[in-house]
Image (spheres, helix red, strand yellow):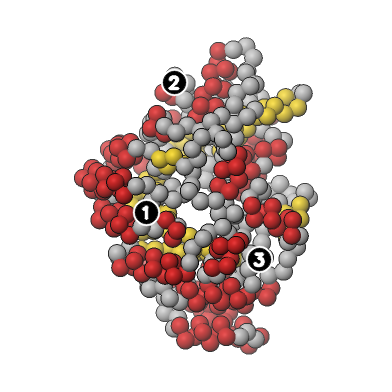
């Protein structure tokens, strides 16, 4: 937008809206003479997006367009409040919209990727073809004079302290896989016939962005690559990356990876130039569940090989898992526990209960099989994630969100094994104790298991408090 002559402000809202900061926000928008507000949201941001959009309409009467993941998941729901939504990628669409609003008496309502709410109904424009040359777009805006962060009382300008020494970047768009619980499983369908789904930026472009970031923010100490699958490039690309990154950036960095994409040669090249932490999606220790339910064709033999290689390279690692899947049986959880017990330490675990996002393959399957049912009565303020949604958060909860769907299956038979899995999150629990609990469950064992978990959690919190002083 800026590179084409439009004036822009950016407001980051990491805290909840309240009367004070919301009123100040309206005052700032009015003083800055804003003509169009864009709201980017994921599903859990929906209540906040509704609140701020309603206030903008009441106080200022200027148009609001929503974009982001939730606008693609539930476009009609978003248009109950927004004047427009952007589906898919927004660079070209938003630029065309701004140009139309600034140069024409009436806004062009035929812009691809944008749906318009009109008195005659919703205008659903088609998706444009995917842009394959990602290097044509400018780097993220480093002009902090026009960027603000909201707190409980109001806004302050973005400064280097807000970055906490970290810089986030994406070197690609799309994913080579279509895991059935992921947005890629439906977005790939949306874009069928619209061009190459997985696209990568040039290595030189990525390095140049990081050089500029280092020049702008002297206190940077870490880079985070948030690509859906960072290593889906050629080995030649990574040889170039290693040389340029080591000589021109030289900071430790983090990336996401799937065991299906693991290539030792690539990871070693990355380790040698700064990779010091990986997040690896395992999801289940049951090959049946990974293959038949999640559409992740990977063997446990491969997963163990990956774990050993990462450990041998001295890279810190986080393993991801999914729980409370109605297609998963207690025996599948036992296989998951047995798999993790074969991982070399140290490692970290994180997991979440399965979330049924509209449009994903697993959601369509669960609807057809009667495990979930349409739920149109849930309050708009309902969220889809939370701390209780994770067995590995040591809360021992197994609540599944009903944000979109009523849950028609019972996970109580798997709760005990979820508790056993929690033991794997602690560094000093002996495997023999885990196997003791894994063999069978009883009321006494459950009580003992909870007591152990609560004790370790209390000790961990005490240790953190001591070290933070």
Which of pointers 2 and 1 lies earlier in the amino acid sequence? 2
The disc label shown at residue 23, or none:
none
Is the residue 110 above or below the residue 139 in the image?
A: above
Q: Identify the residue at horizontal 34%, vertical 47% (top origin).
A: 234
Tell me whether the residue at label 1 lies in contact with that at label 3, contact meaning CB atoms closer than 8 angstroms: no
Q: Residue drawn 45% across and 83% down?
A: 431
Q: Check disc 1: other Cα within 10 Å, few if <14, some if 14-19, many if 20+.
A: many
User: Residue extending furthest left?
Assistant: 247
- First in residue order: circle 1 vs circle 3: 1
Q: Quadrant of residue 387?
A: bottom right
Query: How many numbered discs sit on the rendered protein?
Result: 3
Residue at the disc numbered 1: 254
Q: Are marks 3 and 2 in contact (CB under 8 Å)?
A: no
Quadrant of the frame with the C terminus: bottom left
Q: Is residue 18 above or below residue 455?
A: above
Asked which quadrant contains residue 84, the reply is top right
> Residue 327 has which mark?
3
Q: Tell me if 177 is positioned left or right of 242 in this view.
A: right
Estimate the spatial distance between the alpha carbons at disc 2 and disc 1, rounded to whole Å: 33 Å
- Tell me where residue 71 appears, x and y as whole percent: 62, 39
Q: Secondary structure at mark 3?
A: loop
Q: Nearer the viewer, mark 3 or mark 2?
A: 3
In this figure, which residue is indicated by the disc labeled 2? 4
The answer for how far apart the CA atoms under marks 3 and 2 are is: 50 Å
Label 1: element kind: strand
């Amino acid at each position: 937008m800026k590179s084409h002559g439009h004036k822009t402000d950016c407001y980051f809202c990491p805290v909840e809206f309240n009367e004070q900061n919301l009123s100040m926000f309206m005052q700032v928008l009015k003083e800055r003479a804003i003509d169009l507000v864009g709201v980017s949201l994921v599903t859990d941001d929906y209540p906040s997006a509704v609140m701020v959009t309603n206030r903008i309409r009441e106080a200022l009467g200027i148009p609001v367009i929503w974009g982001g993941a939730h606008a693609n998941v539930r476009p009609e729901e978003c248009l109950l409040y927004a004047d427009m939504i952007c589906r898919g990628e927004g660079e070209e669409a938003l630029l065309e919209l701004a140009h139309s609003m600034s140069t024409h008496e009436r806004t062009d309502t035929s812009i691809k990727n944008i749906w318009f709410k009109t008195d005659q109904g919703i205008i659903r424009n088609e998706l444009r073809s995917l842009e394959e040359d990602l290097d044509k777009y400018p780097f993220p805006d480093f002009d902090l004079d026009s960027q603000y962060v909201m707190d409980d009382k109001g806004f302050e300008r973005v400064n280097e302290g807000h970055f906490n020494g970290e810089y986030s970047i994406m070197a690609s768009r799309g994913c080579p896989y279509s895991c059935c619980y992921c947005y890629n499983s439906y977005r790939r369908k949306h874009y069928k016939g619209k061009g190459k789904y997985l696209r990568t930026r040039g290595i030189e472009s990525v390095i140049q962005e990081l050089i500029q970031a280092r020049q702008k923010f002297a206190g940077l100490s870490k880079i985070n690559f948030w690509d859906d699958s960072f290593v889906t490039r050629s080995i030649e690309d990574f040889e170039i990356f290693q040389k340029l990154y080591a000589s021109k950036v030289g900071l430790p960095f983090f990336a996401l990876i799937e065991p299906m994409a693991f290539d030792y040669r690539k990871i070693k090249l990355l380790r040698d130039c700064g990779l010091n932490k990986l997040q690896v999606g395992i999801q289940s220790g049951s090959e049946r569940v990974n293959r038949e339910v999640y559409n992740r064709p990977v063997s446990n033999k491969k997963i163990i090989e990956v774990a050993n290689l990462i450990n041998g390279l001295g890279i810190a690692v986080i393993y991801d898992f999914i729980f409370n899947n109605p297609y998963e049986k207690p025996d599948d959880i036992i296989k998951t526990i047995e798999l993790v017990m074969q991982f070399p330490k140290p490692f970290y675990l994180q997991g979440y209960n399965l979330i049924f996002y509209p449009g994903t393959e697993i959601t369509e399957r669960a609807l057809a099989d009667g495990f979930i049912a349409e739920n149109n009565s849930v309050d708009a303020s309902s969220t889809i994630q939370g701390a209780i949604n994770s067995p590995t958060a040591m809360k021992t909860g197994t609540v599944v969100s009903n944000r979109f769907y009523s849950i028609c299956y019972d996970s109580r038979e798997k709760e005990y094994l979820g508790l056993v899995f929690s033991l794997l999150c602690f560094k000093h629990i002996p495997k023999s104790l885990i196997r003791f609990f894994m063999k069978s469950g009883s009321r006494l064992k459950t009580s003992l298991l909870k007591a152990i978990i609560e004790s370790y959690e209390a000790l961990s919190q005490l240790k953190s408090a001591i070290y933070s002083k």
